[in-house]
Amino acid sequence: KAGVTQTPRYLIKTRGQQVTLSCSPISGHRSVSWYQQTPGQGLQFLFEYFSETQRNKGNFPGRFSGRQFSNSRSEMNVSTLELGDSALYLCASSLEDRATEAFFGQGTRLTVV
Amino acid sequence: TQLLEQSPQFLSIQEGENLTVYCNSSSVFSSLQWYRQEPGEGPVLLVTVVTGGEVKKLKRLTFQFGDARKDSSLHITAAQPGDTGLYLCAGASSNTGKLIFGQGTTLQVKP
């Protein structure tokens, strides 16, 4: 059974640009959550999607958005990139919509220069 | 706001030593998970504990869920350099549907 796949693994962008990250959950999992991880702040919750609907949202500005498709694949978008957006972005998939075991992808390392 | 506090934040020990990492909260969780993360990689699920007082063993790792389901501990016996990494606990709240993560414990085991 394939795990959670995130693409791309590494990304370098310039301030002001926008970026789209992709996540394919484990087959059969319908919940996808996104997290931002930085050395100083730890794992910060961005948002969670279940059956194409955003179920929970963290305290991030509107520049951070996401969506989920009918096949459960999810994308997150960050517009008008800032230097502080440099981080490891992690996607986690879960079987159900409520808080259950989360399985993480390898992450996308975003560097904003 | 639900919070999970992990302690210690950093731990550097010699190979062969024992250690315990704690995860505490004032909130009750329906389950609690422990993850291990290596640099540049995603966290890997080690174990899920569900019942208050539950103890689970994974080779040299022993996980315990507090009786009141508010806290948990991870004990490593005879630590090895391969145990080096970031250990994260995460509490699942059936009320909010959220997974709350602790700040993590960075463990370094020196050969």
Image: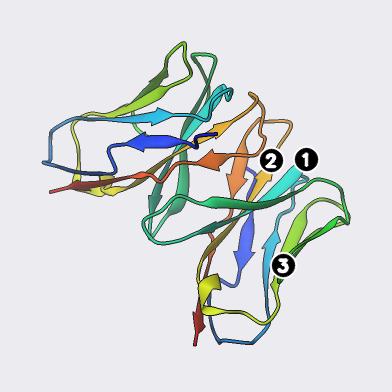
Q: Is residue B15 left or right of residue A34?
A: right
Q: Is residue B87 left or right of residue A109?
A: right
Q: Are both tags, 2 and 3, on one chain?
A: yes
Q: Residue at x 41, y 53 (%)?
A: B41
Where does label 2 land, which residue? B92
Q: Chain of mark 2?
A: B
Q: Chain of mark 3?
A: B
Q: How is the image coloured?
A: rainbow
Q: Residue at x 45, y 61 (%)?
A: B38
Viewer-nearest residue: A87 or B5: A87
Sequence-wise, the earlier of marks 1 and 3 is 1
Where does label 3 land, which residue? B59
Q: Position of residue A80 (x, y in %)?
A: 18, 32
Where does label 1 land, which residue? B30
Q: Are marks 2 and 1 in contact (CB under 8 Å)?
A: yes
Q: Amino acid at mark 2?
A: Ala
On-image quarter of the N terminus of chain A: top right
Q: Amino acid at mark 1?
A: Ser
Sort mark 3 into few (<14), some (14-19) or many (20+) by Cα contacts within 10 Å. Answer: few
Q: Amino acid at mark 3?
A: Lys
Q: Position of residue B99 (x, y in %)?
A: 61, 40
Sequence-wise, the earlier of marks 2 and 1 is 1
Considering the numbered disc 1 on the image, is that residue within a helix, a strand or a loop? loop
Viewer-nearest residue: B23 or B44: B44
Disc 2 from disc 1: Cα separation: 6 Å
Q: Residue furthest top?
A: A70
Query: Foreground mark, 2 or 3?
Result: 3
